Amino acid sequence: MDIESIKQLLGTTAIDLALKILAALAFWFIGRWLIGRVVAVMRAAMNRNHVDPTLIKYLGSIVAVALNIALAVALNASLTTVVIKPLREVRNALEKIASGEADLTQRLRVTRQDEIGEVAHFFNMFVAHLQGIVSKVVSHANELSRSSASMLGSTQDAARRVTEQNDVVSSMAASVEEMTVSISHISEQTTGVKNA
């Protein structure tokens, strides 16, 4: 990676991450401040009505705990919406691509400009590269299959010609054998006429 791409990555990623962290912190601090204000108003109202101070303390604590739980649930819901849900979408898409026949034409939808969107983008790049490699392998395998078929045809043709030549040589050997027998027979007859 060169320095410019690192600067660009840090610029986009760091700014997005910083904004998300600041938003979560702001939500937390504002929520805590509001909880403190609600509990203070409730305690003041109960003091004006001359409620027992121990009861005020307990009720204030109960309300503060309930509101803190509600704040934590709200933060969790926003975190789930911002991070967990998109990760589940990426996981489901990856599972779909990986299952069955591993269809390398499938791609993840890139709808976000954050880290999860980058993961989807780079995964799509990886799958495209892998698809290119598999395509080349298939192409070379088909070419090898055609070459093998051509070689098989040539080998079968050569075997047929060798068989034909073997038949011709065998026929010639039989003819030479017949000629040898004939020459031997003629030689015996000439020897018999010569001796007579």
Image (tube, rainbow, N blue to C red):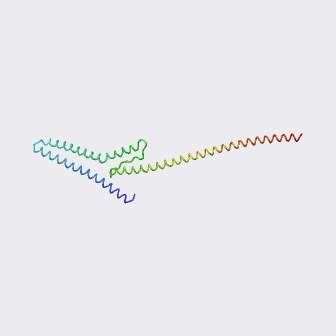
Q: Position of residue 160 (x, y in %)?
A: 63, 43
Q: Is residue 144 left or right of residue 188?
A: left
Q: Is residue 169 left or right of residue 4?
A: right
Q: Position of residue 156 (x, y in %)?
A: 61, 44
In which quadrant of the rendered image does the C terminus lie? top right
Q: Total label count? A: 0
77 or 159, nearer to the observer: 159
71 or 47, nearer to the observer: 71
70 or 144, nearer to the observer: 144
95 or 109, nearer to the observer: 109
In which quadrant of the rendered image does the N terminus lie? bottom left
Most distant residue in the right direction:
196
Q: Position of residue 119 (x, y in %)?
A: 36, 50
Q: Is residue 178 left or right of residue 121?
A: right
Q: Position of residue 61 (x, y in %)?
A: 18, 43
Q: Is residue 99 left or right of residue 72?
A: right
